Image (tube, rainbow, N blue to C red):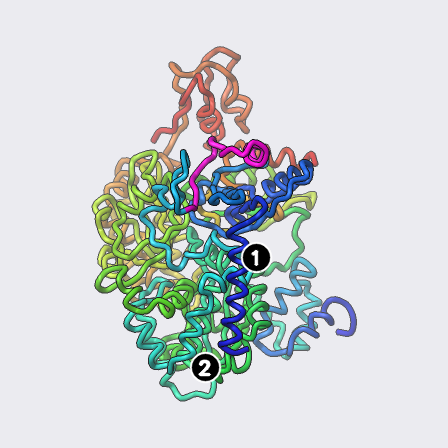
């Protein structure tokens, strides 16, 4: 690992076993997923087998192994959101985008994710599009947001 | 830095605070916690800044944490020079200019969005904020600073007696501090309620060159956000608490294990840690006491099971977050095999108050066995949702009906303790909330999620929801949890589809008991609680699904149909336009027709019809 973002990440860590998860988080922050090549390199650096790194990475919901779409839609299905109709929001998005949670649309524009609790339970149900959080959603509001976003 | 210098610094901070309190220019507070931002606080700030710039007004804007009544978000408060702070609710980018105009130019209180003022004197026509029905019954100890101070300003925390608890701590031998904590009666606020002092003592008395303190901020319970709000609104309370705990147990290194889903909280903590490190409250020889301690932040990577102590330790060590058998308990052998204490955010955040004001002061609140206050996130079908803090021993009725303002529809149950807790019905409304009472009812205190459900929520579906959650989050290490929760979900799904058999009830009960009894960690041992409590208190709903193939709450999709009420339909065509499958047809001004074979039960028509003032509820969902 001579140049590039990985070399920079290396400088910030001592190379301990306990650095594995923070290192993976940094790699994902740079590439938006965990590329195979990056895993190969950090395996050599941290002296942990690739196998074991995948074992750790796949355990945690945060890590992705394929690139995402341009825009990220997340539907919260925490308890409060579930009780207030979060499932309906997921349905609308599944139908409109023709994808299942964890997938990206054919044109690569949107990916859809279901999450358990974003911590805004008092404003349920909640949907996020990229960094923006939409509170107290309804099927109609959500459709309006999608229409507008597609136009923009 | 020594104690004397800290006191001088506090004096300086008090001056700053007094300037802040006696502002010469109009001061605008915006509630900008994650919940405020979700409700649109950043748009409000944008509009506010544009207005101020346009009108060339000299005002200061400060972003504060969540003060609790989330249903009123975004909250904007204004303090004109010489007047108390006055709070306004549900301010949007559109109406903020009207609010500002009324205040800054006409010098009038803006009535339409008025909540209350924070002053001590009476103010004509303006009620007091803390006399609001949601706030009056509360006792705010751990949340005392949330919404009151600028969380990014260390001076604000210092001026409000910040780090005085630490000062007192460092002047005492550790045994005396432990005694104070013991006498205060505080128990672990993460949910299990283990006496904090006992765990500490075991750790302290274990011979080791190194000991660790971990703050568990992996608030994974869906429906709970107490820890997030505290960290966002008052990060120093947690840090001071950690310093007190670390001194008592003799820890040299601390970790805060926090969810990556809480970016704002992480940012606030990083800033606060940098501030106190600069001040000399972190690092070597803190306040000349000889005590050295430092704190690192570890971001979680999205695994609910990492809230379990041993799994959390595994995750910090860079492994899969899978629990191991206990004993040995982490207090004896935890992180890297060293004695380790893991405390919840709220436990730690309460400590500065206990040390500052004394054990007797703290133990005046609460019940015989459960002392002090507890924060809850009050959510679901309750009118006033938000973050609250009440003395333990408060009844559920007081919380739901007085503080929460009751429900729009009929109360059915309240779920305490998240996926590890249970659904408690009407008969528990007068039960005082404490660790023992909730456990006796088949639920747990948990970290403080209170989800209120009404007659439109199906108990079977809710139990299925929780089990799907724990099943998905089961780490897979032990068979009872990995396989057992899967089967519980399968049976519940079958019942929700109307394919349940009467023998399924017995199967659910037996399997639940097996999973509870044989699982390795707390996740599996408590996972069946929602099913068991639902079966115990709401058996007839299971029977309705199984025997009559009906869902009384009209939630389970396979058991409901959508119908148009002919007498009410005005033929406005709104539902026709919104139906994604063309199941609703009919010309304008004539009663519409809904083709059941095409209906996918997406609820779009139901929602839009309710907005129609003339037709009213022309579309209903029946079971």
Label 1 sits on a secondary structure element that is helix
Quadrant where the C terminus of chain B is found in the figure: top left
The mark nearer the N terminus, 2 or 1, is 2
- Residue B183: x percent and y percent? 28, 72
Horizontally, residue A75 falls left or right of residue B323, namely right
- Residue that mark 2 sits on: B211
Which stretch did the figure color magenta?
Answer: B94-119
Disc 1 is attached to a residue of which chain? B
Residue B497 visible to the viewer: no
Instruction: Please say whether residue B105 is one of the residues in the magenta stretch.
Output: yes
- Residue B172: x percent and y percent? 38, 80
User: Which residue is painted at 40% across and 49% down in the image?
Assistant: B465
Instruction: Please say whether residue B404 is one of the residues in the magenta stretch.
Output: no
Q: Is residue B197 above or below residue B306?
A: below
Q: Is residue B339 above or below residue B375?
A: below
Residue B180 placement: quadrant: bottom left
- Residue B17: x percent and y percent? 52, 57
Q: Is residue B508 above or below residue B116?
A: below
Horizontally, residue B274 falls left or right of residue A1, namely left
Q: Gap between marks 2 and 1, in whole Å? A: 28 Å
Q: Residues within 10 Å of mark 2 (few under 14, many from 20)?
A: many
Disc 2 is attached to a residue of which chain? B
Residue A95 visible to the viewer: yes
Label 2 sits on a secondary structure element that is loop
- Residue B240: x percent and y percent? 46, 69
Badge 2 and badge 1 both on one subunit:
yes
Nearer-the-camera pick, B256 or B518 = B256
Q: Residue furthest top?
A: B589
């Amino acid at each position: 690992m001579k140049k590039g973002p990985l070399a920079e990440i290396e400088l910030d860590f001592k190379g301990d076993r306990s650095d594995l998860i923070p290192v993976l988080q940094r790699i994902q922050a740079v590439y938006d997923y965990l590329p195979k090549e990056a895993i190969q390199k950090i395996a050599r650096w941290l002296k942990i087998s690739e196998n074991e790194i995948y074992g750790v990475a796949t355990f945690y919901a945060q890590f992705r192994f394929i690139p995402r779409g341009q825009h990220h839609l997340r539907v919260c299905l925490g308890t409060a959101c579930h009780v207030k109709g979060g499932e309906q929001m997921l349905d609308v998005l599944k139908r409109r985008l023709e994808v299942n949670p964890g997938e990206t649309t054919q044109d690569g524009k949107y990916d859809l994710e279901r999450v358990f609790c974003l911590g805004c339970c008092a404003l349920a149900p909640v949907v996020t599009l990229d960094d923006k959080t939409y509170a107290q959603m309804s099927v109609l509001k959500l459709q309006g947001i999608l229409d507008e976003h597609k136009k923009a | 830095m020594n104690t004397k210098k800290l006191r001088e610094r506090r004096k300086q901070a008090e001056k700053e605070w007094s300037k802040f309190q006696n502002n010469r220019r109009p001061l605008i507070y915006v509630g900008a916690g994650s919940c405020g931002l979700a409700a649109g606080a950043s748009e409000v700030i944008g509009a506010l800044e544009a207005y101020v710039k346009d009108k060339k007004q000299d005002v200061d804007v400060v972003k504060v944490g969540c003060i609790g009544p989330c249903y009123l978000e975004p909250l904007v408060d204004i303090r004109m020079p010489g007047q108390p702070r006055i709070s306004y609710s549900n301010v949007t980018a559109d109406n903020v200019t009207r609010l500002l105009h009324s205040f800054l130019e006409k010098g009038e209180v803006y009535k339409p969005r008025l909540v209350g003022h924070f002053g001590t004197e009476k103010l004509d026509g303006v009620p007091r904020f803390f006399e609001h029905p949601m706030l009056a019954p509360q006792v705010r100890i751990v949340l005392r600073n949330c919404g009151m101070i600028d969380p990014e300003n260390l001076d604000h925390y210092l001026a409000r007696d910040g780090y005085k608890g630490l000062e007192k701590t460092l002047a005492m031998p550790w045994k005396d501090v432990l005694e104070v904590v013991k006498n205060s009666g505080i128990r672990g606020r993460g949910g299990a309620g283990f006496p904090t002092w006992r765990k500490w003592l075991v750790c302290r008395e274990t011979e080791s060159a190194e000991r660790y303190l971990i703050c568990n901020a992996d608030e994974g319970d869906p429906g709970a956000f107490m820890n997030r709000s505290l960290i966002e609104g008052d990060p120093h309370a947690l840090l001071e608490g950690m310093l007190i705990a670390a001194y008592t147990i003799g820890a040299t290194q601390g970790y805060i294990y926090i969810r990556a889903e809480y970016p704002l909280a992480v940012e606030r903590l990083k800033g606060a840690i940098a501030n106190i490190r600069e001040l000399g409250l972190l690092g070597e020889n803190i306040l000349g006491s000889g005590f050295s301690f430092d704190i690192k932040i570890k971001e979680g990577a999205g695994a609910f099971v990492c809230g379990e102590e041993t799994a959390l330790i595994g995750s910090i060590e860079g492994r899969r977050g899978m629990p191991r058998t206990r004993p040995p308990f982490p207090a004896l052998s935890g992180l890297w095999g060293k004695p380790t204490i893991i405390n919840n955010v709220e436990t730690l955040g309460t400590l500065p108050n206990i040390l500052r004001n004394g054990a007797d002061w703290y133990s005046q609140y609460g019940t015989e066995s459960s002392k002090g206050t507890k924060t809850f996130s009050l959510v679901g079908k309750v009118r006033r949702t938000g973050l609250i803090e009440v003395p333990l021993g408060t009844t559920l009725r007081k919380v739901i009906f007085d503080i929460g303002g009751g429900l729009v529809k009929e109360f059915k149950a309240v779920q305490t303790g998240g996926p590890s807790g249970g659904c408690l019905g009407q008969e528990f409304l007068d039960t005082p909330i404490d660790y023992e009472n909730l456990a006796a009812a088949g639920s747990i205190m948990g970290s403080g999620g209170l989800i209120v459900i009404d007659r439109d929520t199906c108990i079977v579906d809710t139990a299925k929801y929780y089990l799907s959650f724990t099943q998905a989050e089961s780490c897979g290490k032990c068979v009872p949890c990995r396989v057992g929760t899967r089967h519980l979900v399968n049976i519940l799904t079958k019942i929700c589809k109307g394919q349940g058999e009467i023998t399924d009830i017995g199967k659910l009960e037996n399997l639940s008991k097996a999973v509870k009894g044989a699982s390795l960690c707390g996740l599996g041992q408590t996972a069946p609680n929602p099913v068991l409590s639902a079966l115990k208190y709401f058996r007839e709903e299971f029977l309705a699904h199984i025997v009559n193939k009906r869902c009384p709450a009209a939630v389970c999709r396979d058991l409901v149909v959508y119908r148009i009420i002919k007498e009410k339909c005005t033929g406005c065509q709104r539902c026709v336009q919104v139906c994604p499958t063309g199941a609703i047809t009919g010309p304008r001004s004539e009663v519409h027709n809904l083709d059941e074979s095409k209906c996918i039960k997406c609820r779009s028509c139901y929602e839009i019809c309710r907005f129609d003032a003339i037709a009213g509820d022309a579309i209903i969902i029946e079971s």
